[in-house]
Image (tube, grey):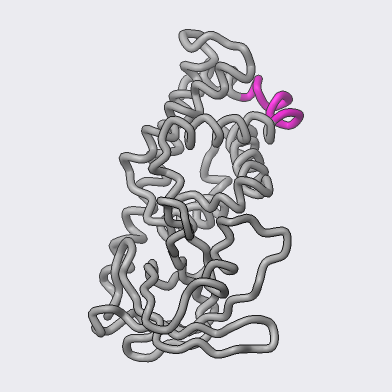
Amino acid sequence: MTPQHIELVKSTVPVLRENGVALTSYFYKRMLGNNPELNNIFNLDSQNSGRQPRALAAAVLAYAENIENPAVLAKAVQHITTKHVSLDIQPDQYSIVGENLLHSISEVLDVPMDSELIAAWKVAYLQLADILIGVEKQKYENLVAQNGGWAGWRAFKIIAIEVSENGKIFTVQSADQQTVAQIHGGEFISVKVKVPQKNIEQPHQYTVLQATENTYQFAVKPEENHTEYSVSNILLNHYQVGDQVKLTAPQVK
């Protein structure tokens, strides 16, 4: 990035501090409206509650504040890329995000798309995207290299459901009954389910309680103030032994 690009991006820091959540809320609404297939990736409960827009606003602000030295954000990059890999985010989706983010900045800040500010943010976004894509590529490769490991979504069958004090404990087995990656403690998995009466799927993360050669066990608690997209409540109310779900490989938060 040139010094001018850096100066222009940093000039938006006060606006991001004041109106970052409004910008990111607009961005998600715009992107998901233009690209409805992404509703299968992003947790709509997190969208409706505002959790995801707030998280993205904080990340965009931190990036703008440290645009001269993205290495400062190494810990945040690790967190973001782990979450992305758990959702099977792919490189080609970054162009969709970038296009909608730049248009959102233009539309919310009332700045022309051909302005120097948008050009600077485009360079900044491409720089960040390259960093994230590179880290995620290595993480996908590391997952595949594990015994029983895999990248992306894998089919699992529910083989047991036990009632617990706070909800239910689900045990799932790989649909192909082949070996699955083992855990060492603290790993989480993403579980994707079909939303009843909706033509979409939704993901949610759960801590792995136990693993065997080809099974994982995780606890599901009911969610208060939930919407129809709540994965936990869908699992508790609509899924039974014999049904299938999709999982991404265990990762450490």
> Residue 216: x percent and y percent?
43, 83
Quarter of the C terminus within the rendering: bottom right
Q: Quadrant of residue 159?
A: bottom left
Q: In which quarter of the image is residue 177?
A: bottom left
Q: Residue at x 36, y 73 (%)?
A: 244
Please tell me whether residue 15 belongs to the stretch shown in magenta. Answer: yes
- Image position of 79 with respect to 154: above or below: above
- Image position of 5 with respect to 85: above or below: above
Q: Which residue is drawn at 58% across and 17% down?
A: 107
- Image position of 22 with respect to 172: above or below: above
Q: Give the left or right position of residue 123, taking residue 237 as reference.
A: left
Q: Quadrant of residue 123?
A: top left
Q: Which residue is drawn at 71% across and 24% down?
A: 15
Q: Give the left or right position of residue 168, taking residue 146 as reference.
A: right
Q: Residue at x 51, y 9 (%)?
A: 115
The single residue placed furthest to the right in the displayed view is 18
> Residue 32: x percent and y percent?
48, 37
Quarter of the N terminus within the rendering: top left
> Residue 148: x percent and y percent?
28, 79
Residue nearest the viewer, comparing 212 with 171: 171
Residue nearest the viewer, comparing 129 with 172: 172
Please tell me whether residue 242 belongs to the stretch shown in magenta. Answer: no
The single residue placed furthest to the front in the displayed view is 197
The rendered magenta stretch, by its main secondary structure, is classed as helix
> Residue 157: x percent and y percent?
35, 79
Q: How many numbered marks, from 0 up?
A: 0
The stretch of residues the image draws in magenta is 10-19
- Image position of 53 with respect to 234: above or below: above
